[in-house]
């Protein structure tokens, strides 16, 4: 049996078929969504969310047809950003560094237990960087005191405002020191990015902003992380899961042992892949749509969610998506589940439009699909 990994992942990630009811549900389903590119992260959420006229009220908890030219107007990706911003403003979704030292959007109740599994190793691994930046325990203590004093009582600051507070106290003076201090406080579960403020989020105290976190035991948390990753990202391998979370091999084995009974295993070229048992039917119900065109922002989970991206992105073209291997992922054009090019916005004002940069000549149907998807692409400005 041939396993169509690329299109199964579209279905698992809610990029085809019905989207999640709200932005909060979309983030919770995905478990974590890479978010150093803030506008791109908002678009990634919107592309996985049903269109709705009302702002996101906070979502609901989880128990754990297009043609080749892009098809009819999609039901996902609400054309404005109110839903996802409401999820941030009400504290249903937060942004922090739960894994890999990289910013992600997560459901607010999940951040604490995710940090409990990852932060110790990340903080230990950053010791050399702290030394390079001249950061010692006394400086960390002072930065913490100032932040807690400024934020206690439900108050918030822009990132620049918190950095200025530290600067006035003489803690900075070295490039990147302010960033690392904020990262350190967030790794310890003291702060996170909460409510929106124009094109950014304000820093808040995590315990105040998220007063009722989910607190599973360690083994339960490992099992929950495994089942949620494979349900939302599968078919995927254990190597993909370990790369995505950066859990130890022992922790990954524990999580997988607890999750395996809720997952379906498939063989892909002799390698075991795991997924939600419901994903094949979900793809079957959206087969026509999965054969169409999609525009994704840079850093989207369809690309970033795996150690091995070859099912979706031909390694021969990887350099076009990440030029020079510099870690900056460009927005992508997909056709039939595979990346066929990148895209960017060009022009100004009324002449501003999406321009595709294909790897090879695109068929007319795909070019028309790009135009259709560009017109539907979430507005996040």
Image (spheres, rainbow, N blue to C red):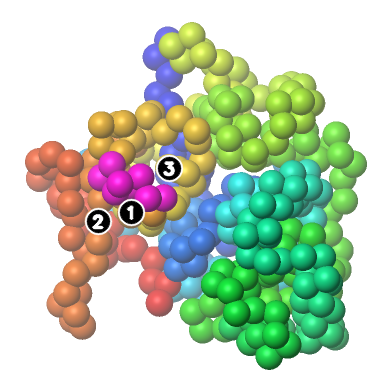
Looking at the picture, how far across and down is residue 102, in whole percent?
A: 58, 54
Question: Which of disc 3 and disc 2 is earlier in sequence?
Answer: 3
Quadrant in the rendering for residue 227: top right
Q: Is residue 260 left or right of residue 355?
A: right
CB within 8 Å, label 1 to label 2? yes
**Which residue bears the numbered disc 3?**
303
Check disc 1 and report its element: helix, strand or loop: loop
Label 3 crowding class (10 Å Cα cut-off): few <14, some 14-19, many 20+?
A: many
Check disc 2 and report its element: helix, strand or loop: strand
Task: Name the disc covering residue 157, or none.
Answer: none
Identify the residue at image location x=55%, y=37%: 233
Any magenta on residue 267? no
Looking at the picture, how far across and down is residue 210, in whole percent?
A: 80, 68
Identify the residue at image location x=84%, y=59%: 213
Identify the residue at image location x=68%, y=59%: 131
Looking at the picture, how far across and down is residue 249, in whole percent?
A: 71, 26
**Which residue bears the numbered disc 2?**
343
Say whether residue 4 is visible. yes
Magenta-drawn segment: 319-327
Q: Residue furthest bottom?
A: 168
Say whether residue 22 is visible. no
Looking at the picture, how far across and down is residue 312, in whole percent?
A: 36, 34
Any magenta on residue 326? yes
Q: CA distance from mark 3 to mark 1?
A: 10 Å
Question: Which of disc 2 and disc 1 is earlier in sequence?
Answer: 1
Q: Is residue 44 above or below residue 222?
A: below
**Which residue bears the numbered disc 1?**
330
Identify the residue at image location x=78%, y=44%: 117
Q: Is residue 238 above or below residue 45?
A: above
Q: CA distance from mark 1 to mark 2?
A: 8 Å
Quadrant in the rendering for residue 339: top left
């Amino acid at each position: 049996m041939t396993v169509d990994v690329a299109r199964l992942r579209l279905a698992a990630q809610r990029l085809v078929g019905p989207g999640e009811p709200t932005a909060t549900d979309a983030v919770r389903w995905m478990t974590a969504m890479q978010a150093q590119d803030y506008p791109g992260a908002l678009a990634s959420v919107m592309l996985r969310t049903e269109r709705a006229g009302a702002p996101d009220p906070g979502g609901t908890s989880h128990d754990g047809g297009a043609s080749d030219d892009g098809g009819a107007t999609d039901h996902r990706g609400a054309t404005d950003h109110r839903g996802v911003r409401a999820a941030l403003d009400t504290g249903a979704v937060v942004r922090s560094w739960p894994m890999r030292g990289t910013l992600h959007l997560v459901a607010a109740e999940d951040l604490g237990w995710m940090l409990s599994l990852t932060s110790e190793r990340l903080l230990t691994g950053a010791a050399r960087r702290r030394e390079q930046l001249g950061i010692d325990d006394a400086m960390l203590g002072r930065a913490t005191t100032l932040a807690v004093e400024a934020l206690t009582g439900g108050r918030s600051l822009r990132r620049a405002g918190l950095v200025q507070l530290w600067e006035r106290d003489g803690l900075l003076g070295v490039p990147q020191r302010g960033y690392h201090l904020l990262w350190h406080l967030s790794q310890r579960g003291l702060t996170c990015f909460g409510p929106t403020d124009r094109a950014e989020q304000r820093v808040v105290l995590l315990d105040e902003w998220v007063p009722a976190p989910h607190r599973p035991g360690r083994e339960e948390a490992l099992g929950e992380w495994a089942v949620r990753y494979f349900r939302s990202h599968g078919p995927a391998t254990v190597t993909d899961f370990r790369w995505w979370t950066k859990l130890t091999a022992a922790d990954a084995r524990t999580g997988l042992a607890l999750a395996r009974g809720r997952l379906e295993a498939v063989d892909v070229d002799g390698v075991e892949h795991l997924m939600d048992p419901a994903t094949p039917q979900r793809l079957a119900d959206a087969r026509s749509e999965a054969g169409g065109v999609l525009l994704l922002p840079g850093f989207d989970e369809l690309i970033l969610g795996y150690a091995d991206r070859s099912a979706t992105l031909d390694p021969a073209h990887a350099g076009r998506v990440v030029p020079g291997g510099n870690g900056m992922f460009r927005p992508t054009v997909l056709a039939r589940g595979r990346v066929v090019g990148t895209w960017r916005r060009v022009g100004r004002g009324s002449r501003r439009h999406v321009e595709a940069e294909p790897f090879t000549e695109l068929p007319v149907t795909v070019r028309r699909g790009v135009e259709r998807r560009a017109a539907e692409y979430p507005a996040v400005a």
